[in-house]
Image: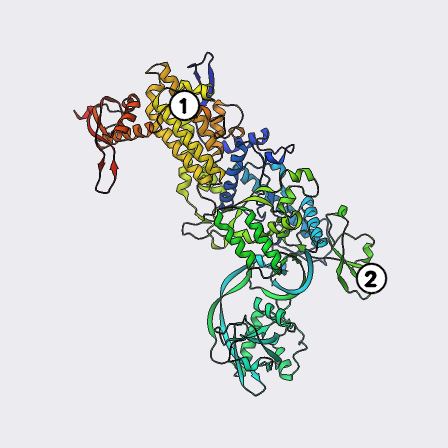
Amino acid sequence: MVAMAENTLGTDSPTTVNVPDRVGLEGLEEKFSTRWEEDRVYAFDPETTRDEVFSIDTPPPTASGSLHVGHVFSYTQTDVIARFMRMCGKNVFYPMGWDDNGLPTERRVQNFFGVRTDTSVPYDPTYQPPAQPAKNRRDWDVVSRQNFIELCLAQSRDDEEVYEQLFTQLGLSVDWDLSYRTIDAHSREISQRAFLQNLADGKAYNAEAPTMWDVSFQTAVAQAELEDKEVPGAYYRYAFYADDGSEIFIETTRPELLPACSALVAHPDDERYQHLFGKTVTSPLFDVAVEVYPHPLAQQDKGAGIAMVCTFGDQNDITWWRELQLPTRTLIGRDGRFARETPEWITSDRGVQNYAEVAGKTVFSAQNAVVEMLKDAALLDGEPEKITHAVNFFEKGDKPLEIVTSRQWYLRNGGRDTDLRNALIERGNELEWHPSFMQSRYTNWVENLTGDWLVSRQRVFGVAIPLWYRLDADGNTDYDSPIVPADAQLPVDPVEDVPEGYTAAQRDVPGGFTGDPDVLDTWATSSLSPQIIGRWSKDDDYFANVFPFDLRPQGHDIIRTWLFSTVVRADQLQNSIPWKHTALSGWVLDPHRQKMSKSKGNVVVPSDILEQFGTDAVRYWAASARLGADTAYEVNQMKIGRRLAIKLLNASKFALNLGATEDKILHNADDAAVVTHPLDQSLLAQLHEAITQATKAFEKYDYARTLNLVETFFWHFTDDYIELIKDRAYGSRGEAEQASVVATLATALDALLRLMAPFQPFATDEVWSWWRKGSVHAAAWPGLEPELAGIAAASQAGDVDVLTTVTRAISRIRKAKSDAKVKQRTQVLTATITAVEDRVTELEAGLDDLRAAGNVRELTLEQGEAVTTDDGETIDLQLTAITLADAE
């Protein structure tokens, strides 16, 4: 049922509004999501110019599993900015992507279907995965590379559909026609073209070098993907032997690396070891002679002050190996096990025999074996000292990383080039950071890089490295002169495709070629999100209209990965920063101030809270948090947001049914003449101030302050102003007085709907549909001139403080009634308010509304002095006497 409210006040022709008899939030998400899509409310217009566009480089969420409440939090914050810019007249470029290649997708597919891949298995075009995965991983299906990729593609599509449904329910104003996947043909083409451009420019190179390696995932790991975890360990103390028989004790947490020892190092100023520099000592158990070197990286106060250098135990070992040009004695392989053959540098009978005890063992088992041998030979000095220490893990892994020697591809990122490092730090200075203190995280990361960006991964599902390599007559690979595909061939899969000038029969045979089996790190593709969504290298005009982007929103925890890597690529490819502004969201914390994570079991499922509280309520909670602020998951905030949305519906219904229709809105200064009452003028003055301050805050990306300002005015409007003007609004004091209040109601409601639209898009568009055409989200932000002129003109005619002072007075009267335990409609026979001169003047301007709202028969205003309380509070307005009808 819909009530038809008709109002003819102040106009020669009636205006009709359609206000439901009953209002509510239920069903609004589905209703308006469908309408927005059908009406193309958020569509980007490619026929544009750069100055008209506001472009957003949106984070593509990893499409592997379920979304969590953190996504709702950060994506809402981006969306309110997008909606504001659109209402400010910008042609908003707001796409959504899915980061669906890489390890997370592979792991999800493996676990979901119970399959694992083997490149030697032939493709089966009829393969269907088991309905239920086997409980034991050893019983999982072994499938071909291509079958596994097909499963990954299918599963990620299913996940993305779920994500899109939730983001639609969340009210994100993205243009879904601009959606992309980091594994689709377009993204692969852009990613491969960028890599080949880097190669041609000398910014990409391959090298055989020590590499952080995850033995579980069987892939190399970049520095940005490392995570330190505290694990239990122990210091083991044992001695090397000098030629004169003296003992040189070292302390280490990794005794299993003793057979891989290349040297000992001590600080140049350490007098305990200066006599040993340049001399050799012999290792226990394995009898290998190693030289003692001075190096400033050695710490005199750590352990014994002299370190065992093994290739490779940690990053220090890599530094010492490189700078001291030590021999490479790598024993741990990609499988995480020690080499099965005795290495050539172990030659003594005892050494060979002892090495047989660790050959082929895992790191854990090898450590136990070496420790037992040291104990049996009475070589351990004292009991091991138990400790807890930080160890490198892959951020998605559950075992400590090892360092193995492997051939990998790298992009130059300043880690080994001071000039480039400084240039990338300067790129950070070109950006506008929101909040500004986040820039230090970027700068600190770049300053502390220890190597170039490792971008190759030994995985299956990803963007293939687009290269082949010639094989010589003996079948050896020529890595120095790779075969590059023609640009028109992109995207290519070197494992399946054949380079020009060769045949398929020449694959992997002497004199033929081999395809690069690796894929690019997922960050190497997602770091190109501006180029991918901007159609770089495919549509120059389109790219020029969006790049550099206006905004990169993202979490502060991936500054070192996604933000920095995107800066690197834009610097390499466009000699530019990728965006003008970056907005960093904080984390969502549980009630105990802990970061939410699946491993901790404290994650909240977004669909649950959206169903329980409604989208507008959840968005209110998310938008209440400032950028960069870690924020607790707070149900009470969502309840407040829901109350706000419901109040908006009810207050709007009341105002519209009073005749606050579209034709009553003050559109310009001439319209303002109808607003004659000081209380109305005061409200509009406060509205003018709220709009001005809210706009300034939004322009600085401080949407949380905008929401606070708008919400504060809204409650003042509904709880104070509307309660004060009801008598006039119903016409008790004539048409002119009624016209003044109705115009004020219409103008304030019109502005409030637009001010609240970015935060509560469903409730505001519902109210808008009752009395206006189109969508509120296609309307202009109320702070735009010259539209604000009508409000400004009306507000200038009155005193901004009148409404506040009258509100204070009515609250005193209401409190007196509450204290007397009588109903608010109880008549006040007499009342006296004592106030300072300015307050009395303001009360006189709104006296009629004050009397009507308080049901006061006789109200006396007396001028008096301000009173100072014992707490130092100055009171300039008091209810000094009151007589209630029921109290006689």
Above or below residue 532? Residue 376 is below
Q: Residue 157's quadrant in the figure?
A: top right
Circle 2 crowding by C-alpha within 10 Å: few under 14, some 14–19, many from 20: some
Who comes first in sequence, dot 2 or dot 1? 2
Location of residue 819 in the rendering, given as x and y in whole percent from the top left corner: 22, 33
Circle 1 crowding by C-alpha within 10 Å: few under 14, some 14–19, many from 20: many
Label count reads 2
Residue depicted at 52% across the width and 77% down the height: 250
Amino acid at dot 2: Gly
Amino acid at dot 1: Ala
What number is the disc on residue 593?
none
Location of residue 173 in the rendering, given as x and y in whole percent from the top left corner: 55, 36
Secondary structure state at the residue bearing disc 1: helix
Above or below residue 812? Residue 584 is below
Q: Give whichever of 135, 56 is nearer the camera.
A: 56
Would residue 3 be seen by someone viewing this image from the given angle? Answer: no
Location of residue 627 in the rendering, given as x and y in whole percent from the top left corner: 47, 45
Location of residue 251 in the rendering, given as x and y in whole percent from the top left corner: 51, 75
Q: Relative to residue 348, is residue 636 drawn left or right?
A: left
- Name the residue beneath numbered marker 1: 794
What number is the disc on residue 511?
2
Q: Give whichever of 591, 281 is nearer the camera.
A: 281
Outermost bottom residue: 244
Above or below residue 470? Residue 645 is above
Q: Give whichever of 22, 615 is nearer the camera.
A: 615
Q: Nearer the viewer, mark 2 or mark 1?
A: 1
